[in-house]
Amino acid sequence: MASSLDFDVLIVGSGLAGLSAALLLAPAHRVAVLTKRALADGSSGWAQGGIAAVLAAGDSFDAHVDDTLVAGAGLCDAAATRFVVEHAPEAIGWLRELGVPFSEEDGDLHLTREGGHSQRRIVHVTDATGAAVQQVLIERVRRTPNVTLFEHHTLVDLVAGERLGAPEAGCAGLYALDDASGEVLAFRAPHTILATGGAGKVYLYTTNPDTATGDGIAAAWRAGCRVSNMEFIQFHPTCLYHPHAKSFLISEAVRGEGGLLKLPDGTRFMPRHDERAELAPRDVVARAIDFEMKKHGLDCVHLDISHQSPDFLRAHFPNILARCAELGIDITREPIPVVPAAHYTCGGVVTDLAGRTDLPGLYAIGETACTGLHGANRLASNSLVECMVFARAAAAAIGAAPARAPVALPAWDASQVTDADEAVVISHNWDELRRFMWDYVGIVRTNKRLERASHRIALLQAEIHEFYANFHVTRDLLELRNLVQVAELIVRSAQARHESRGLHFSRDYPSLAEPTAPTVLVPADR
């Protein structure tokens, strides 16, 4: 048996969910935070819009719950929705105590409004909320004695006690690849939290960073956990369309503050698709843009906020204004070219209201998890608050959990593998996967497209299994393995839903089906 790195809690992921959990657990636990790149490289830092919470005098928990349920198209879990909404103000208060500089107006928090919300309830830091929050959390975590950071460590697999002949052990720890040494290390703890984010990189066009490869979802599935609602991939309606603007998001708040979607000839089109026009939920707006682009043979549509004053735009959208200006687009005078892009994974690992998964000792929080909050479509700015609410819930559950005896982890066996001589195979498969997922499992789906995707996935899985068995693992191979697994889960979930609801739109089943229920996939070996 090899010696393992021992902690009280392992946290995989360094976004808002993972770092919040680390800070909340650190006073009483030895915490390890593993992240496969640098601390700031996850999706949280890219979030522009803000965090939803009931803070205004005319708002109410019931209104926030109702807005969430409407966006979720009948699939939100009522208890999870109310749990998040009622704990949201506390989460905002905690961030303010940590020093997050939320935008203010006349001494009060400035609250903006986004699509699907009936009230102004979005706290923000101009148009770079995620980056500002992450900066504060990272600085705080780096100063916290009980937190050990393992940057550039990629999750290989979880260790389920059942596979060690000790099923009572639940999740005994994990294996992670140290990028610097190329060695796979064993980490052991009675509690492990997956906070690895979503899986946007399974698609060709995404607003997500390169780290969003579904690692936690795939690892939990392999460890025997159920996943739910993977067919509901949110496509953000407005990603900047420019050859040099990789994954740059044009915030929902631009439409919230009066931005209008137009065809190249200047014609508005959203009122023809929905009475809420530009303030309709994201799935409606994304499908409308997709429809207009295909109908007119367009590469993009235009989002026009130029009727607002330059001072207003500089105050509310400084980063968007600056980035567009770098690319020669003056948003004070001309519209912004935009296209839809994969943005958020509404499904994930099934959890309870404390973040617990099916595997004892294993928790999932943030975009990795499926708590039931988002249903068939996430309401704008509900994701960051979900990260914090469930980080606190998981930390409380871990603090109250009875002690569990550690289990010895076997050493990672790399004696039978060699160095891969054809890295081009991995990059080719990665590219093929993202292209056919975009073409066949995108905003609009059909049975035939899903069948084609399923066939391609099976071929890729066979190739990757052979690669994984015979060659030293690399981060690229691990990410590809996880993406193909997540792609399979998305396609299987989409094939199981014989209706169009929320983010899942099928030409073969264009109507709603009643009754409806979440899609839950169960690992075959359970």
Image (cartoon, rainbow, N blue to C red):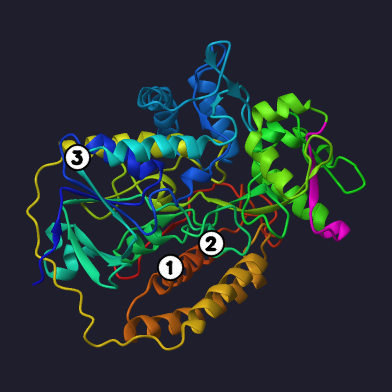
Name which residue lies at 18% across and 57% down.
Answer: 170
Q: Position of residue 239 (x, y in %)?
A: 67, 50
Question: Where is 170 relative to 325, above or below?
Answer: below
- N-terminal of the pair, mark 3 or mark 2, is 3
The residue range painted magenta reads 294-306
Q: Residue at x 22, y 64 (%)?
A: 159
Q: Residue 447: name its quadrant.
A: bottom right
* Residue identifier under label 3: 145
Measured from the top left, where is residue 86 in percent x and y? 41, 24
Q: Is residue 295 magenta?
A: yes
- Residue mark closest to the camera, 1 vs 3: 3
Q: Which residue is label 2 attached to? A: 201
Mark 3 and mark 2: Cα distance apart in space: 34 Å
CA gap between label 1 and label 2 equals 10 Å
Q: Marks 1/3: CA distance?
A: 31 Å
Q: Could you say where residue 388 lies in the image, as x and y percent from the top left?
A: 38, 35
Amino acid type shown at disc 3: Pro
**If the image is split into quadrants, where does the N terminus sit?**
bottom left
Which of pointers 1 and 2 lies earlier in the amino acid sequence?
2
Residue 190 drawn above or below residue 250: below
